Image: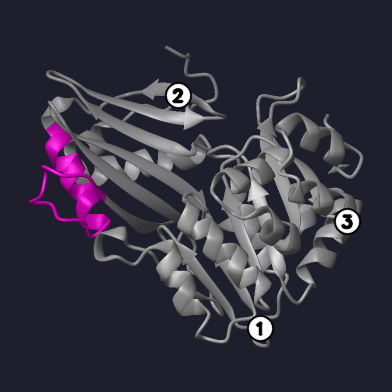
Amino acid sequence: MHSSVGLPTAKTSDHDQRSGSVGWVDHLFRRAVAARASDIHLEPFRHALRVRMRIEGELQEVESPGSDLAREITSRIKVLAKLNIAEQRVPQDGHLVWQHDGRSFDIRVSTLPTSFGESVVLRVLDRSGLRGDLSALGMPARMVEACSSVLALPHGLMVVAGPTGSGKTTTLYRALGTFDASATKILTAEDPVEFKTPGLIQVSVDDGIGLTFARTVRAFLRQDPDVIMIGEVRDPETAQVAVQAALTGHLVLTSLHASSTEGAITRLLDLGVEPFLLSCALAAVVSQRLIRPSETERRIPHFELLVVGEAVRQLILERPTPTALKRAVESSLIRAEEP
């Protein structure tokens, strides 16, 4: 078990305990924000409710209100997230918006039925992270300039790649923020919509009713968009429709789970995108991950950018091995210097 280094030292007060689930949930959110937690985990066991927060990538256990309040706390969170409190047999997903000290936090909620009750995971998304341009993310000036050139293209595919929790969504929204929404038709397909943003037309996909990423993007193409953002490419159909949209006069931004720039290209090929289509459509890949500088505990984003040139396009046509592709892109990468 990890130590609680970095957590606020205050414990749950008697007032919070007396106020029951309502006060305790609010207290939990305040603690998570103070600790800069990315996720909150509420995990029920036979005689205990374990509460953990993911801070700087590590899970750290915090004080629990005890198992007696577990069901009430879960119900309170489900009410806030507009989930069905009577349904405890199947997983549910939702979100809520929490206001604190003039800041607005989007909190994604996932419930999972277990042997001893519903396990709840909450992802905390700080809307203040969307303010500013790409340079505010830590990108060097040369990389920001190159990204801006890609975003000025009339069509093409820009992929933001990285592991879970590396900030891909924040990067996508910062990129969308470079456009004049009053003069640009911007449509987003997300699962779910993470940040409701004025000027953007945002759609939450719902596989349960057949509103998949692919079906949503196909509908977008009949809405005369200039820019399309796809929250994540994770299946062959979505990959293919993203490439098709980029080839038919639209600028498409999306995220992809991949560990490197060349890995993102390999992943798209593995998802069944034809090499000649990907070669024509792909404009750029931003790869990002979180690193921990030696002088501080706080992780910061590290970026690499590949603006796809003719040499890489020709290589994609040959369906290269990951090793060959890595060698080919190495000389074209723009990197942020690691601390």
Q: Residue 232, how many percent across, how many down? A: 52, 54
> Which amino acid is tagged 2?
Leu
For the question of whether residue 212 can be seen, the reply is yes
In the displayed structure image, the side of residue 115 where residue 267 appears, left or right? right
Furthest residue in direction front, as rendered: 318
- Residue indicated by mark 2: 59
Residue segment shown in magenta: 69-92
- Residue indicated by mark 3: 310
**Disc 2/disc 1 C-alpha distance (Å):** 41 Å
**Disc 3/disc 2 C-alpha distance (Å):** 44 Å
Secondary structure state at the residue bearing disc 1:
loop
Q: Residue 203, how many percent across, how many down? A: 42, 71
> Which amino acid is tagged 1?
Thr
> Which amino acid is tagged 3?
Glu
Please identify the quadrant where the N terminus is shown: top left
On whether residue 19 falls in the magenta region, the answer is no
In the displayed structure image, the side of residue 283 where residue 208 appears, left or right? left
Secondary structure state at the residue bearing disc 3:
helix
- Residue 143's place in the image compared with 190, above or below, is above
Q: Residue 35, how many percent across, how many down? A: 51, 34
Answer with mark 3 or mark 2, whichever residue precedes in sequence.
2
Q: Locate residue 302: give its quadrant.
A: top right
In the displayed structure image, the side of residue 101 where residue 319 appears, left or right? right
Identified at 71% across, 33% down, the residue is 322
Q: Residue 304, how many percent across, how many down? A: 79, 42
